[in-house]
Image (cartoon, rainbow, N blue to C red):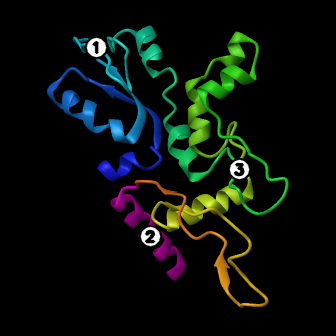
């Protein structure tokens, strides 16, 4: 966990329900290296919010309270952002576009009418199958695929691997080291690798 603190946290916000229970008290601390903010929710007493925490009291039988609890918890957005979606990759090409990785915050800022600014559950389903407001560039798709194939090691994409001096013949690597690492679960990576191997053999 200590190594993760020096890397880019993969999540902006994680929701922990049942945070007042025994397991919740343990996870309350252990989730902090993985996210900027841990959102704690329970009907019981959660005490005072520490640094990197926010508290939302919630009775799961209260529909309005549940919506408040889920507000801003953009799991898809926060998981995909470290892969480079919705931002320039920095490749050595001109006029690279950012594309769009939608979130509840983006929608509130993008529209004026209240009914348009609200995030609906059906929109999350659309995002989950690659539709809806998603707008990714081919470079972002290639970059994310390379990162996944590289077990979460993020390398800045480039056209030129190295530059050779015409006089000394010395070579300089254009991207000498990784940008950061995404802490992916190895069991998930193994499933992807097995699936890819099966497809290639057919």
1 or 2: tag closer to the N-terminus: 1
Q: Nearer the viewer, residue 36 or 65?
A: 36
Q: Could you tell me if residue 202 is visible in this image?
A: no
Q: In this orientation, which residue lies closer to the viewer: 163 or 98? A: 163
Left or right: residue 155 versus residue 95 is left
Q: Which mark is residue 88?
A: 3
The label number, if any, that marks residue 193 in the structure image: 2
Question: Which residue position holds label 1?
Answer: 48
Instruction: Give the CA distance from mark 1 to mark 3.
Output: 39 Å
> Which residue of the protein is positioned furthest toward the right in this rendering?
95
What's the magenta bit mostly, secondary-structure-wise? helix
Residue stretch rendered in magenta on the structure: 184-202
Q: Secondary structure at mark 1?
A: loop
Rounded to the nearest angstrom, the CA distance separating label 3 from label 2 is: 27 Å
User: Quick one: label 3 or label 2, which is nearer the N terminus?
Assistant: 3
> In the rendering, at what x and y percent does residue 189 appear?
41, 63
Q: Is residue 125 above or below residue 1?
A: above
Q: Residue furthest left?
A: 22
Q: Position of residue 21 (x, y in %)?
A: 18, 23
Give the number of callouts.
3
Q: Give the number of the disc on residue 13.
A: none
How many other residues sit within 10 Å of disc 3, few (<14), some (14-19) or many (≥20)?
some
Which mark sits nearer the N-terminus, 1 or 3? 1
Q: Position of residue 7 (x, y in %)?
A: 44, 50
């Amino acid at each position: 966990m200590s190594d993760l603190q020096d890397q880019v946290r993969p999540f902006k916000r994680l929701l922990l329900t049942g945070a007042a229970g025994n397991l919740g008290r343990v996870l309350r601390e252990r989730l902090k290296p993985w996210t900027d903010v841990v959102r704690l929710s329970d009907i019981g007493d959660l005490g005072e919010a520490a640094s990197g925490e926010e508290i939302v009291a919630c009775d799961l039988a209260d529909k309005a309270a549940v919506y408040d609890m889920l507000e801003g918890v953009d799991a898809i957005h926060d998981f995909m952002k470290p892969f480079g979606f919705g931002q320039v990759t920095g490749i050595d090409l001109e006029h690279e576009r950012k594309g769009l990785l939608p979130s509840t915050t983006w929608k509130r800022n993008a529209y004026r009418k209240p009914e348009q600014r609200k995030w609906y559950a059906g929109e999350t389903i659309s995002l989950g199958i690659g539709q809806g407001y998603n707008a990714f560039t081919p470079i972002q798709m290639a970059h994310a695929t390379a990162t996944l194939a590289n077990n979460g090691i993020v390398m800045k994409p480039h056209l030129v691997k190295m530059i050779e001096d015409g006089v000394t013949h010395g070579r300089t690597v254009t991207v000498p080291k990784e940008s950061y690492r995404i802490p992916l679960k190895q069991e998930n990576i193994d499933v992807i690798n097995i699936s890819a191997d099966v497809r290639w053999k057919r």
